[in-house]
Each structure stands twice: as structure tokens, then as C-alpha cells.
């Protein structure tokens, strides 16, 4: 028996039945074809494959052994064997496990090369057993003739095929290049006949690559079936390396080779990150990224109901690893894996051998992936390359009519703005037909919320590992800004975290004085360190001890943290905007447990929900305590100053922060520690300075109260901490 390399399953159902390739898919190395190709031996071979490989060990609740000898010596021909195997497989009630004639096996086996012959459409069987067009290939005979996504194929050359199998429909439609076929379709209840001249179809993975206004790179990845798809995407990213952000368009992408999904994900996700898991009867196999990412540019992914299987795996890997938001419509929901097996007589079979789990252990089969921003489209504002109502072409992605693309451009621009510390653009609500909603983000901003079910609140899951970035600046490039103790505060807190809070030393990075430049802080937060090491269910602690600027120093009304190289006369271009700080962190770090500690003048203006409208000095804490996963403790209220100790070489805030976290040892709850901290800070500053300093806690937490000193349950080796 030979088995073909494992495919993601869309090849079996979604792709194409109308693709006719001319080269072979490489075979996995297994035992050679059985010498005996008699009908009975072929049937026995098929039974054994299902017995060993089928994903459901109950075989749809039946006695599978009863099928082994059901036909005995009744099988006298190849057609008898094929019919018997088909009947046997139908008992599994799995539409993806099916027998393939020799002809169809060759069609499926040979679809990986880019040269195809036929009309160029991607077909599926609906739950009602109707043959539906998933998508015509751009530029193909089907596309040029006006075949649309969602068309139901009813007749071929006048023959009624409404209830025919997919193989039968394909058999009638296929034919030599240059010959004509008449397809009868049902479109929205109306019957229509379309004549199509079959032709040779060149399949490319990327249907469009361009640079959109604003220096945003755009890649429309049309197919994962072509074996050189990863190479095409790599080349596209190389050409777009100077773009400020990337939009990856997976709309109407039906999947293809699972290896393509993995290799393309690796272009965006760093080595060691979990991409997805495959669950079979025998094991759960985790697939992780094997190489450093090629692109760390801000990324948004477009999806719709035609995004299926391997394309869903790719989209979920990018989202679950914090690399991208999904924008568009709920995806198809194809989350099981098939393998194609060669039988001894040259026929074959597809068998469901496993199911997928996303990097966050989500099941999406028959459910689909919900986008972070839902944008529903109507007749003339859908994907830019096709007007669904008339089948007419539109010239380019820049025509502005594609609502989903318009939303993606807004989203990636905001990611770019967050990384640069700039204010976000207004949300472009669509006008006319179409609807835009934000099911994952009540704030309407591109935050990095973790999607969790009610029983999976962050505070109720164990902390797997812990990471800390500590910034303390005593000596500034501009000497007139110098402070006494921030660098020492950061060092003291680092030692406390390592020695008493179970943080591994290589998991704690300190940026002090001249090492705490604006670019080095943003690199550690958003590029070179934390995004590469942090995983879901990790705890991230961020500490900043420096100057904070009041909003009246900037005409934009923005509060800033001061880096080592910040010019107080040019805060907009050299400072770290405080109100945007959490947005930058959440856009780049894929943890749902982030604690930010701010020991700076005017640090109370930071807003953990990061709404662009919150620019005033005073923030309504009650209004922003929604959602999950972030806490901010600032050393003072928005209109106050953070003070240094008179009797000890620390700031008042950091001294009492460390002491308060010790009160109950490993079991110190952060809420209790904060209450004690606030009392101690208020008392000392009032006593020694005659002033008021009241630390502020702002939280978006759900679940059990956090204890940051508990040991991690699954610590990992740290990467080398970059300077």
C-alpha cells in the first residue's frame, strides 16, 4: 500500500473537482503496492486502512468488523470492489471519507502542479448534497464566463446532475482544452445556462501583490494547493520588506497542502511557537514553528465564508500567536484532516484521520473562525476582484468599494500607529449596504484581547511562565532631567522578582539609563524580545521608573513617558505616549495576563483599555474596568507627582511595592498588596513632603485574584536577552 503525503482535507472536498493536473504528487515512503489486486484483496485493503486510520474509533457507533467479510466472493470486478468500498465507507456518515475511482485518484494525486486543464472552479458538496461553487479561479474559463461563488451546478450538457456525486459531476465537466461544455446553474433561485470553453489553467498561489496607499503591502493568497505557495509568499514579503504593514487576504482561499499552511505561518511567527495540533486516534501531534520569522511587520488577515481548511489553520495560527487580527466574515469551518490512500488496483480513497486544534486549543470544525472585526458585504462592496451581484470585474484593490479591505487598511494603519506611539485613526464605519461590527472588541480599537470562553478566564488558569521588562532611568541624555533612584529601583525590583517571586533570571530584562532609549524600549516590547518568548497563559510584568510629562507640555494633550533620549521640546517624536502604551503592548505581546507598573510623575493618566478618546488628565476608572487580562498600577493620580524617599535610596512607590508584595509570601494577592501599598505611600509622602501621592489601580481582570509570586507551572528556557 502507498499513502500520499497528508493533505489538509480541502483537497478532498473544497478543491476542485474541476482541476486537472499533469504531474504527480510525491508519495510518502511506505510499503510497495500489494501484488494481489483482485477485487476481494482491494476491498480488504480498504477495510484495513479504515480500521487502522479512521479518526472515530467507534466507526459511527457500528461494529466495523461486520464489514470485513460482508461481500465474500461476490466481488468479481474492479467496479464491484469500488461500489462495495463506497457502500462500506458511507456507513461511517463522514462525507470526507470516500472511495476514488482510478480516474479520480489520478486527478487528486496530480493536482499539486500549477498546470491544470478544465474550466477552473473550486467545488464542494453542501450538507444538502448540492454541488456548490466555492470559487472560480481568477482568469480561468469559469471566471471569465461569469461563474460565481455560491452557484449550484444543476446540469452539465443538459444532463440533470443535481443529486449526482462530486465525482460524477467532475466526470461530466472535465474534457480536453478547447472543447465546450454547457453548465446549468441555480443562482439565487434562478436557472441559467453558461457555455464555457475548457482550457489550460495556470495556478499561482498569489493572485495579487501590491503596495496600497500609506505604504501598506497587500498579498492576496488565492490557494494553498500549489506546492510552491510558501516560496511565492516568501518572495512577496521580500519585495514588500519596506512596507510599514501587511494585509494578507485569505478570502475565498479553500486551503490545500497542510505543509503550505505551516510554512507560510512560519514566515510571520518566530521559532518555537505552537501553530496548531493534529488529533488522531493514536496521538496529539503539536506543530511548532521551526524557523525565525521573516516578517515582523504589523499584520491583518482578511477572511470570509470561503476561507476554509488549511487557510483557516493559517489564519488561526497568526491570530492565536498574537501576530494578526482577523477581519471579514466567519470562515467555512473545515477542521478535520484527510489522507489519500492508493489501493492495489490503482483506485484510491480519502480517509479522515484526524482533526485540528488551533494554537489555543480551539475546535473550529463545523463552527468556523469568528473574525475579530465582522464586516458583512452586499452586492457591490465585497472582495474587490469580484462584484457578486453581476459578476463584473473591478479594476484594483484601491477602488475603495471593498468594505472588508477598507477595514483591514484601517486596522493595519492603527497597528503601525500604536507601534510608533501615534494616535489611532477613526473607525471607518461603512455607509450603504453592508455592516461592520466588532464582536471581539467593545472599545472599537485594535486591542489584543485574548478570546476565552467563560470557563477559561485568565485568572482561573495556572501561570505557565513569567517574564518581566523593567525600565529605570536615573541619568538622561539631557542631564537636567537626571533623577536619583529609578535605575536602582529597577535593579532592586529585578532582584526581588528573581529571588522571591520565582522569575527566572533570564526571563527578567532591565533597561537602565543609556540602555533605555525609546527604540530599545519599543524593540523589547514589540519586536526583539517579548513577542518572541511570551506564550498564552504566561504572566508579563512591565515596570517603568522615569519622568512622566503632564499633558499641558504638549499641544496634543498627550501624557508621555520620558526615555533616555527623549527631548522634552519634541515629545511627539521622541517620547512614549502614555495613553497609547497599553495599546502598543497588547498589539505585540500575546499574553492575557499583563501587569504594568508605572513609577513616574503624572503616570496616573495611563488607560488600560486604551481608548483613543481618553485624552483628559482624569480617567473614569469604573468606565474602563471591562474585559480580561490587564492591570495597571500607577504611582500617582493624573494630577500628582511621584516622590523619592528621603531616608532610603528608592522611590516611595517602588519601596512600598516590594514590601507589600512580601506580606503573604507566595500567596500575596495583588489587590491586598495594592491596598497596603497605597496606604504606605500616602502616609509617607504626606509626612515627609506635605503633599498627596495616591497610587491608582486600573484593571480589566476577570477570574481569581492574581498572585504574581506563585511559581510558574511550565517554565521554559529563556532566549538570550538582547541589549
Image: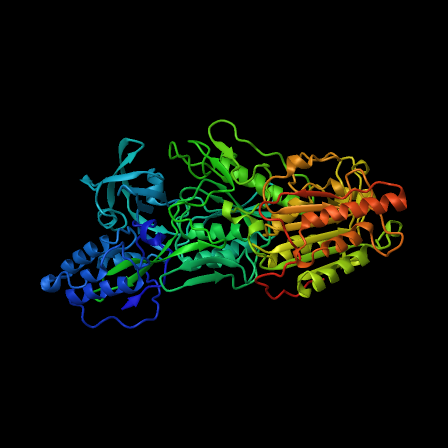
- Where residue 204 sits in the image (x, y, percent)? 42, 52
State the image quarter where residue 277 is shown: bottom left
- Where residue 591 sits in the image (x, y, percent)? 59, 52
Query: Camera-side residue: 167 or 284?
Result: 284
Where 575 sits versus 443, above or below?
below
Query: Camera-side residue: 676 or 166?
Result: 676
Number of marks in the image?
Answer: 0
State the image quarter where residue 605 is shown: top right
Where 375 sits versus 499, above or below?
above
Q: Quadrant of the C terminus?
A: bottom right
Colour scheme of this structure image?
A: rainbow
Q: Can you see residue 361?
A: yes
> Which residue is situated farthest in the front direction here?
664
Lateral position of residue 244 relative to residue 166, left or right: right
- Where residue 33 sits in the image (x, y, percent)? 25, 70
- Residue at the image position 62 percent from the left and 61 percent from the top: 711
State the image quarter where residue 573 is shown: top right
Query: Camera-side residue: 688 or 437?
Result: 688
> Which residue is situated farthest in the top direction here?
432
Q: Quadrant of the N terminus?
A: bottom left
Q: Can you see residue 231?
A: no
Lateral position of residue 660 relative to residue 154, left or right: right
Amino acid at each position: 500500500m502507498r499513502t500520499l503525503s497528508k493533505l489538509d482535507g480541502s483537497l478532498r472536498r473544497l478543491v476542485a473537482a474541476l482541476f486537472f493536473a499533469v504531474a504527480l504528487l510525491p508519495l510518502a515512503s511506505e510499503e510497495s503496492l500489494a501484488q494481489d489486486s483482485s477485487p476481494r484483496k482491494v476491498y480488504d485493503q480498504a477495510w484495513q486502512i479504515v480500521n487502522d486510520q479512521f479518526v472515530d474509533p467507534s466507526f459511527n457507533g457500528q461494529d466495523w468488523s461486520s464489514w470485513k467479510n460482508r461481500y465474500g466472493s461476490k466481488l468479481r470486478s474492479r467496479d464491484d470492489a469500488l461500489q462495495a468500498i463506497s457502500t462500506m465507507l458511507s456507513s461511517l456518515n463522514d462525507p470526507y471519507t470516500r472511495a476514488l475511482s482510478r480516474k479520480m485518484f489520478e486527478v487528486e494525486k496530480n493536482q499539486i502542479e500549477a498546470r491544470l486543464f478544465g474550466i477552473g472552479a473550486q467545488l464542494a458538496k453542501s450538507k444538502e448534497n448540492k454541488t456548490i461553487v466555492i470559487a472560480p479561479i481568477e482568469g480561468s474559463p469559469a471566471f471569465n464566463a461569469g461563474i460565481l461563488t455560491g452557484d449550484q451546478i444543476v446540469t452539465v450538457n443538459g444532463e440533470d446532475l443535481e443529486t449526482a456525486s462530486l465525482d460524477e459531476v467532475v466526470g461530466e465537466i472535465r474534457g480536453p482544452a478547447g472543447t465546450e461544455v454547457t453548465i446549468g446553474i441555480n443562482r439565487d433561485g434562478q436557472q441559467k445556462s453558461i457555455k464555457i470553453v475548457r482550457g489550460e489553467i495556470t495556478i499561482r498561489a498569489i493572485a495579487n501583490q501590491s503596495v496600497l496607499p500609506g505604504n501598506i503591502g497587500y498579498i492576496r493568497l488565492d490557494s494553498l494547493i500549489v506546492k510552491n505557495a510558501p516560496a511565492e509568499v516568501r518572495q512577496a514579503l521580500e519585495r514588500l520588506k519596506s512596507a510599514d504593514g501587511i494585509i494578507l487576504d485569505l478570502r475565498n482561499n479553500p486551503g490545500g497542502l497542510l505543509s503550505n499552511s505551516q510554512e507560510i505561518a512560519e514566515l510571520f511567527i518566530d521559532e518555537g511557537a505552537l501553530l496548531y495540533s493534529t488529533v488522531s486516534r493514536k496521538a496529539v501531534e503539536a506543530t511548532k514553528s521551526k524557523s525565525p520569522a521573516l516578517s515582523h511587520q504589523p499584520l491583518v488577515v482578511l477572511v470570509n465564508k470561503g476561507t476554509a481548511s488549511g487557510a483557516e489553520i493559517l489564519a488561526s495560527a497568526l491570530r492565536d500567536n498574537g501576530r494578526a487580527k482577523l477581519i471579514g466574515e466567519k470562515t467555512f469551518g473545515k477542521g478535520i484532516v484527510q489522507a489519500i490512500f492508493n489501493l492495489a488496483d490503482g483506485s484510491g480513497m480519502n480517509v479522515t484521520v484526524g482533526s485540528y486544534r488551533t494554537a489555543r486549543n480551539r475546535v473550529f470544525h463545523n463552527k468556523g473562525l469568528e473574525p475579530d472585526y465582522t464586516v458583512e458585504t452586499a452586492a457591490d462592496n465585497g472582495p474587490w476582484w469580484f462584484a457578486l451581484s453581476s459578476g463584473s470585474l473591478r479594476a484594483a484593490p484601491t477602488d475603495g468599494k471593498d468594505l472588508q479591505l477598507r477595514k483591514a487598511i484601517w486596522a493595519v494603519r492603527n497597528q503601525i500607529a500604536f507601534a510608533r506611539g501615534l494616535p489611532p485613526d477613526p473607525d471607518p464605519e461603512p455607509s450603504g449596504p453592508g455592516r461592520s461590527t466588532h464582536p471581539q472588541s467593545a472599545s472599537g480599537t485594535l486591542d489584543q484581547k485574548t478570546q476565552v470562553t467563560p470557563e477559561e478566564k485568565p485568572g482561573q488558569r495556572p501561570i505557565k511562565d513569567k517574564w518581566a521588562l523593567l525600565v529605570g532611568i536615573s541619568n538622561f541624555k539631557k542631564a537636567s532631567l537626571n533623577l536619583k533612584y529609578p535605575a536602582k529601583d529597577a535593579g532592586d525590583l529585578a532582584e526581588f522578582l528573581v529571588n522571591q517571586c520565582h522569575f527566572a533570571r533570564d526571563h527578567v530584562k532591565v533597561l537602565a539609563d543609556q540602555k533605555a532609549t525609546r527604540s530599545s524600549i519599543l524593540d523589547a516590547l514589540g519586536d526583539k524580545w517579548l513577542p518572541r518568548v511570551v506564550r498564552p497563559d504566561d504572566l508579563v510584568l512591565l515596570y517603568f521608573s522615569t519622568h512622566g510629562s503632564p499633558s499641558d507640555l504638549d499641544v496634543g494633550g498627550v501624557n508621555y513617558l520620558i526615555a533616555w533620549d527623549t527631548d522634552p521640546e519634541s515629545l511627539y517624536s521622541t517620547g512614549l505616549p502614555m495613553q497609547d502604551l497599553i495599546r502598543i503592548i497588547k498589539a505585540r505581546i500575546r499574553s492575557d495576563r499583563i501587569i504594568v507598573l508605572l513609577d513616574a510623575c503624572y503616570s496616573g493618566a495611563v488607560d488600560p483599555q486604551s481608548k483613543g478618546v481618553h485624552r483628559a488628565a482624569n480617567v473614569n476608572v469604573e468606565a474602563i474596568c471591562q474585559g480580561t487580562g490587564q492591570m495597571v498600577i500607577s504611582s500617582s493620580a493624573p494630577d500628582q507627582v511621584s516622590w523619592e524617599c528621603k531616608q532610603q535610596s528608592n522611590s516611595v512607590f517602588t519601596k512600598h511595592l516590594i514590601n507589600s508584595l512580601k506580606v503573604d509570601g507566595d500567596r500575596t494577592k495583588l489587590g491586598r498588596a495594592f491596598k497596603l501599598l497605597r496606604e504606605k505611600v500616602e502616609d509617607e509622602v504626606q509626612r515627609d513632603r506635605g503633599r498627596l501621592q495616591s497610587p491608582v489601580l486600573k484593571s480589566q481582570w476577570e477570574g481569581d485574584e492574581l498572585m504574581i509570586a506563585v511559581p510558574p507551572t511550565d517554565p521554559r528556557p529563556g532566549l538570550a536577552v538582547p541589549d
